[in-house]
Amino acid sequence: MKHRLFFSVLAGYVVVIVLGSAGMFLSFRQAAGREFRKYLLEGQQMAAARAAGFVSEYYRRIGSLNGLDGFLKSQLKDPHMGMGERPMMSRWMSGPGRFVVTDPDFTVIADTSGRLAPGQKLPPKTFGGPGPGLHEMAVPIEQGGSIHAYVIPSLAVDPRLPPEDRRVLETMQNGAFVSLLLVIAVSIAAAAVLTLHVVRPVQAIGGVVDRISRGDYAARTAFVRGDEIGALARGINQLAASLAQAEEWRSQLISDTAHELRTPVSLLSGRLEMLAEGLYTPNPEELAKLSAEVQRLSALIEQLEGLSAFDQGAYAPELKNLDAGILAAERVKAFADEAAARNIGLRNSVSEGFFVRGDSLKLGQVIDNLLSNALRYTPPGGTVEVSMVQEVSIEEKGPFIELRVEDSGSGIAPEYREKVFRRYFRIDKSRSSHEGGRGLGLAIAREITVFHGGVLWVDGESRYGGARFCLRLPGAET
Ligand code: ADP
C-alpha cells in the first residue's frame, strides 16, 4: 500500500489522542460531579444553619414540631404568609437550600424538597460512609438542654441531585464533551499535517532510492530541510552523485583499458598473421620489438592487477621500520645511468636516518615512478633533484617525512595537478605511450601512499622551474 506509513503513523497518533482525551474527559466528569455536589452541599449546610433558627422559632412558638411539614409546604406555596421570613427564604428552601427536619431519632418530620415523607426513618447507611457523617452535618434544635430535632442538608440524606441541579451538571458535562470532540478533531487534523510533514519526504527519499537501486544515478531529492530528514536527503544525493561518478569512472576505465590493450595486441596479431601467411620473416631486431611490446602488455596487466588489489582491499604487505633516506638514495642511484644518458643532472640531497614504517618494495616503486617521470618530462641538459625533510606536525600527531622530487621540465599547470593522479590521465595524449607511460603510474603511487597513511601531491614550487612532487609519510620510531 502506497500510503502505509502515513496511515500507520496517523493511527498511532489517533489512538494516543483518543485515549488521552477520553481519560481526561472521564476524570474531568468525575471531578466536576464531585466538586459540584460539594459546592451544593456547602450551600445547603449554610441554609440548614439558617433554617435551624427558623425551626427553633417554630418550636418555641408552637411548643412542638407538629404541623411543621404542612407549614413549610404552605410557606413554599405562599411566601408572603407566615412568620415574617423574607420571601427569598421560601425559594431558597425549595431550591439550593433544601433541607430535611428530623426528630432526635432521625425520623423525617419535614422535607422541603418533598422527596421524603414525614414519619420515614432515615436509612442507617446515610449516617456513615465516605465524607462527613450525618451527625456532623445535622444541626441540632435544642431547647431546655435537650435536642428536639435536627435540620439536615438534603444532599447529606439523599445523594440524588434534584432535576434542576442535574440539568446544570449535565449542561456542564455536555459542554465538556463537545469541547472534547472538537479537541479530538483538531488534534487529529494537526497530527495528519505533522505526519504528512514527516512521511512525504520519507516517501520521496524512498522513490529516489528506488530509482538509484535501478541504476538511475541522476535521481535526486528536491526538497531542502535543515533537520535530520534534510540531512538524509542530502546524504542520498551525495550517494547518488558518488555512484554516478564511480559509474562514469568505471566505464571510462574499461574503455581506456581496452584502448591501451588494442594497439599492442593489433600490432602483434598483424605480425603473427603475416608470419603465418609467410609474408614476413622475422629478424632478431623485429623479434626484439615484438618482445618489447609483449613486455609492455604484461607490465600493463601487472599495473592493473596492482590497482585492482588496492580496490578490493587485498593489498596487505608486512610493514617494517625502514630508513627512507637509504631507500631514496638507492633508487636515485638506479636512475643514474639513465640520467647520464639523457644528459640530465640528477642530484641526490637526501641523507640517512629518516625512518618510516612501510613496504620498501612498494615505497621504492613510488620513488621510481616520480624519478622516471621527472627524467622523462625534463629536456636534456636539465636538472632533477631529490631531497628530504623531517618535520614535527601538530595536526598529524607526530613527525613526518617529506620526500621531494623536483625538476626543470615543463612543469604541470595548476588545473592538471590533481588530475595527473587519475587512472590513464596524461596531459599530452598525443604523445605515444611508447614515449610516455600509460597514465597509471601516479594513480598507483597515490594508492600506495594512502595505504601508508601518507599524502602525495604536486605543486609548482620546483626550484628548477618544473614540477615538484611531494611524498609525505608519517615518521616512525628508529
Ligand atoms: P605516465 O606513465 O603517463 O607517466 P603517470 O601517472 O606517471 O603516467 O603520469 C601522468 C601524467 O602526469 C603524465 O602523462 C604527464 O603528463 C604528467 N606528469 C607526470 N610527472 C610529470 C613531470 N615530472 N613533469 C611534467 N608532467 C608530468
Image (tube, rainbow, N blue to C red):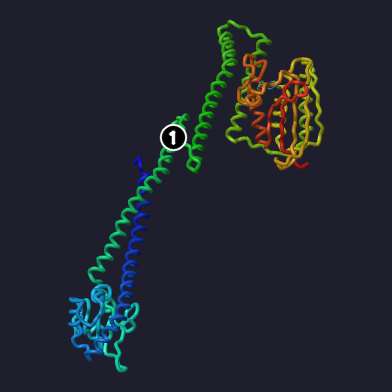
Query: Mark 1 CB in 8 Å range of ligand 1?
Result: no
Label 1 residue SS: helix
Q: Nearer the viewer, residue 286 or 14?
A: 14
Is residue 97 shown left or right of residue 369? Answer: left
Q: Is residue 156 above or below residue 351?
A: below
Can the viewer see residue 148 in this picture?
yes
Mark 1 nearby-residue class (10 Å; few <14, some 14–19, many ≥20): many
- Image quarter where the C terminus lies is top right
Look at mark 1 in the image and give the residue it sits on: 208
Q: Which amino acid does the dot numbered 1 rest on?
A: Val
Is residue 288 shown left or right of residue 332? Answer: left
Q: Is residue 206 above or below residue 9?
A: above
- Percent across and percent down for residue 170 are 27, 64
- Percent across and percent down for residue 234 are 50, 37
What residue is rendered at 38% in x and 45% in y? Answer: 193
What residue is rendered at 50% in x and 34% in y? Answer: 237
What residue is rendered at 51% in x and 29% in y? Answer: 244
Q: Nearer the viewer, residue 57 or 5?
A: 57
- Percent across and percent down for residue 314 are 60, 35
- Image quarter where the N terminus lies is top left
Can the viewer see residue 299 in this picture?
no
Q: Name the quarter showing ligand 1.
A: top right
- Percent across and percent down for residue 469 are 71, 27
Q: Is residue 91 above or below residue 348?
A: below
Q: Nearer the viewer, residue 323 or 187?
A: 187
